[in-house]
Amino acid sequence: MTATEWAIVVLSLKVGGIAVLFTLPLAFGLAWLLARSSFPGKVVLDGFVHLPLVLPPVVTGWLLLLLFAPEGPVGMLVDDLFGASVLFRWSGAAIAAGVMALPLMVRAIRLSLEAVDKRLEEAARTLGAGRTRTFVRITLPLALPGILAGMMLGFARALGEFGATITFVSNIPGETRTLPLAIYTQLQTPGGEAAVIRLAAISVGIALLALVASEVLARRSGRGVHVL
Amino acid sequence: MTATEWAIVVLSLKVGGIAVLFTLPLAFGLAWLLARSSFPGKVVLDGFVHLPLVLPPVVTGWLLLLLFAPEGPVGMLVDDLFGASVLFRWSGAAIAAGVMALPLMVRAIRLSLEAVDKRLEEAARTLGAGRTRTFVRITLPLALPGILAGMMLGFARALGEFGATITFVSNIPGETRTLPLAIYTQLQTPGGEAAVIRLAAISVGIALLALVASEVLARRSGRGVHVL
Amino acid sequence: MSFDIDIEVARGERVISCAFRTGDGITCLVGPSGAGKTTILSAVAGLARPRRGHIVVRSRTLFAPGIDLPPEKRHCGYVFQDARLFPHMRVRENLDFARRPRFDRNEIAESLGIAHLLARWPRTLSGGETRRVAIARALLANSDFLLFDEPLVSLDPPRAEEIAALIRRVHEDYELPVLYVTHDRSEAKRLGARLIDFEGNEVA
Amino acid sequence: MSFDIDIEVARGERVISCAFRTGDGITCLVGPSGAGKTTILSAVAGLARPRRGHIVVRSRTLFAPGIDLPPEKRHCGYVFQDARLFPHMRVRENLDFARRPRFDRNEIAESLGIAHLLARWPRTLSGGETRRVAIARALLANSDFLLFDEPLVSLDPPRAEEIAALIRRVHEDYELPVLYVTHDRSEAKRLGARLIDFEGNEVA
Amino acid sequence: DPAAAKGPLVLVAASMTDAAEAAADEYVRTTRHERPVISAAATSALARQVASGARADLFISADEAWMDWLVQRDLVHPRSRTDIARNRLVLVSAKQREWIDSRAGLLQALGKGRLAVAEPESVPAGRYAHAALSRLGAWGAVANRLAPVENVRAALALVERGAAPLGVVYQTDARATSHVAVVGRFAETAHPPIVYPAAILIASTHPETTAFLDFLTSNAGRGTLAKFGFGPAVTG
Ligand SMILES: Nc1ncnc2c1ncn2[C@@H]1O[C@H](COP(=O)(O)OP(=O)(O)OP(=O)(O)O)[C@@H](O)[C@H]1O
Ligand SMILES: Nc1ncnc2c1ncn2[C@@H]1O[C@H](COP(=O)(O)OP(=O)(O)OP(=O)(O)O)[C@@H](O)[C@H]1O
Ligand code: MOO
Ligand SMILES: [Mg+2]
Ligand SMILES: [Mg+2]
């Protein structure tokens, strides 16, 4: 790998990692709401979560741009709070990646949450665990396979995210040029095939490593699933 | 909706529906392999399944183009078998959508398969059900939440698939111009924003309907999850 | 008075109602299969919400109009009919789940014959081993009263006898009210329990 | 001769070994909790694979060097210690799961007192109701022999007596070999069973 | 084969989408031929589709590099190659401001902001922008302050939203939106000519392909393209 490629890899890892970590609590909260409670407008929320999946990525990027533009509703807020903008910044790339990863993470986590045996949570309550402790010690670990699967899916998606990112935060070397943007640049160039393949192989390698890591984690924690 | 838009919607439904239906058995088979068996190279297979998620969609589209080109390895086979090519055809769009949906479907189904209580399969075997009957009557229905979630994710992804499709089968009205490609075309057209918003709203509406349908199905079949 | 219970609990289309007061000893609630014994225990533990009535244990009101303590505030040790061990924790962690244990974990494990199982995952336990771990887990919780739902099924008679004696000892030493469900009269006798039906009438 | 069993089954680090031959009557396999009773039944049903040995039932070899019939070819009716009802099927569908039933489903349901539960989902059943459905499901399979793992726990004595009588009747009418696990001596007596330990020695 | 039941299949660079559609309409109106089927995507994607042997009839590229690439591979008839239109680069801004015609003016208008452009290493519009900014002597100053995006439309969106104070786009895109103002225009000599070369594919089988290409180079065709801001190609 050249130094440039190495920098791109580091940036991609940063963007993907931060995207997944920051999206995780939100995804979990949404999955929880969708799995465990019923309220008017639940279908609408569910649909909203799926938006970034259904819309072409460039449209999602465009909507993000509307929101985060200096005069956009979120953009003004961010400016007030941090005195800065996420446009053209790696933080914006992470936001785009996180938004695209969200529906995948929510679904996987929700599937696992729905499979958690509520009788075990009841047992924990009778043993003196309040809602929080029950959640942390019982629900969360039992839903772990889904959480890990969701993180893996989300990370892979973040690693491959192109359309929303370039539309939202453009393609700035060292700041927002993640692997897929670098690949795209090469693909647009006549004769860029060799570079495309090299960069794509790097992407795939990273994803494989993440996959192995998530499998190992899942195996280390997913020992007993059955209840008598 | 105008007649053109209506035709685009019908095409998108056809492409997305066919993509999900044809991908489902493959996704299920892969999920089964990954959930239930261990063999050398399992991680590689797992990684391979994730490829379309990790690679930028245009790269996936380009790889599909290489594979399905008249002189490409799969293209020659398809030509031998059907005397036709999928390039520039809606069937090619369905292939692109199916490939992009595959990792999402595999993950969701796999999560559910891993949560199926094998003791119930054992019970079915003692009651005289062979592997097939056990699979059809026990495993499949118990994994249904994941299968439905996978189909829903896959369909939503198919509905939003842009990069691989346009790269692989171009943007041909009536043949491969699905909703996201129509949206892209409008985005390329100065003053097309209103049309973009209309088309995006249609996409979202379809996804919401699919979502409601999948929820209803899941509720109708997912009654008892617990075992004493 | 240990338990003062008068409730109605809805289960599907049925309503299970039950009213009794118990004295100091261990009380066995009897009734045929499907009568609603488990339902009543759940309501006492705070896991099923009665439609009306009250639940008072040792003059502490757990449930009454306007009062509905959450399960974790009721301080009960509950051995479920289905053992409900936490599958993602080893036996040791299952036993240590409740804070401020009343007993030494290892001693209890010893007396229930599960000391050698501490490092095992629940799914590797036999039926009787599972029950014993569930009993140990409930006894270790520092609770104000105990609920047992057929805890000794799947246990060989000598072992069952030992554990019955242990339960009786705990009941007496700590003056804990005990509500017990069993179909085994000899087990009830061994516990020195009084048998009552859903109306609180003594059963011969 | 009904059962001719001589096997070694590995369970975690332990090896459970067992060798016995049984006569015509019902045979109760006894042993303390954790002895390996469930393990032996699983092996006979074809769900656990012995390390060595043979399993012959009524001169049909189910397992021997070179022979290992899959569970569905063994034709057994097995009542599991954990009932294992299919949660996604109503009680009726659970009962109808086995093809070519030996009895009329409604008659069996009647005699087990579960006729009113046919349209219910398993998770809404009480502990004793669950067991009775599991017994009915196993009896309905047109099997060559029956395996029972503590089927009558959670049942009130009159009900348990009735079902024991039913099992005995089925055993006699159809000359079905029965291997039965229980810790309850009176239950074994009611079945007219011979008690044996893992070495095939008669137990007093 | 639906492409044969209709008119020829025309692969058009995305930046010419609406003009090509209008030209097709006009062509049908005047010639009564079947309407060509227009497939619009990035030039690079279309070129690769041609290279993989996809059956299309006409290719309209947004730059010469990709057309050259196809010529080298013997995938288009070299003699059919014709430049059908020209485009120009303009500077746009969200609000009216003083006309920009110098490096200083550009940098002053840009302030601390970024300059929205199509990806200069790969997208045709970006490569032209690179050349034009170099000629203006501003490349060194702005190279690190670009906001390179996938295509001209995305660059326009950045400017419309106030995310970038200035953008370099095709005049065809700028003139069609009322949300931005043209605040500068690069000299046509400041960059390689922005031409849209068209050529018939070797794989083409549609008998009316030539007719459509001829129409595009006719007065009527040029007139239609001109309505969208495309200039006539300089021939010879
Ligand atoms: N969701 C439900 N719908 C309908 N009936 C229900 C539901 N849940 C429980 N029941 C019924 O309520 C009754 C009481 O159940 P419960 O588990 O309390 O009985 P039990 O006395 O503990 O019986 P057992 O001794 O068999 O365990 C049972 O007849 C059961 O079928
Ligand atoms: N995976 C495992 N690892 C270690 N030990 C195991 C494993 N599975 C089962 N065992 C042990 O094997 C022994 C036999 O179990 P089995 O279920 O056959 O006992 P059992 O005689 O049926 O007991 P019970 O009367 O309590 O049901 C038990 O001591 C159990 O702990
Ligand atoms: O028309 Mo292009 O190929 O996107 O500049
Ligand atoms: Mg009960
Ligand atoms: Mg057992």
Image (cartoon, coloured by chain):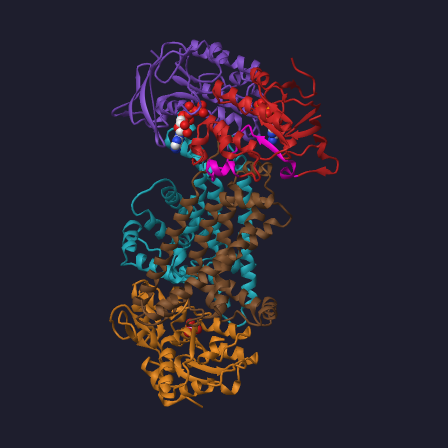
Chain colours: A cyan, B brown, C purple, D red, E orange
Residue D83 in magenta? yes
Residue D64 % position (x, y): 73, 34
Q: Is residue C80 visible?
A: no
Residue C11 % position (x, y): 36, 30
Between D90 and B28, the one nearer to me in the picture: D90
Q: Is residue B87 above or below residue D88?
A: below
Count the numbered circles shown: 0
List the single residue furthest toward the right.
D65
Answer with left or right where residue C104 lies relative to residue A95: right
Residue D13 in magenta? no
Between A101 and D180, the one nearer to me in the picture: D180
Between E121 and D140, the one nearer to me in the picture: D140
Residue B74 % position (x, y): 59, 66
Residue A31 % position (x, y): 39, 44
Q: Quadrant of ligand 3?
A: bottom left
Specify start and end residues of the magenta stretch as a single range.
D70-96
**Location of residue C64 by image quarter:** top left
Image quarter hosting the C terminus of chain E: bottom left
Answer with left or right where residue E184 lies relative to residue C190: left
Q: Is residue B178 visible?
A: yes
Between A23 and B210, the one nearer to me in the picture: B210
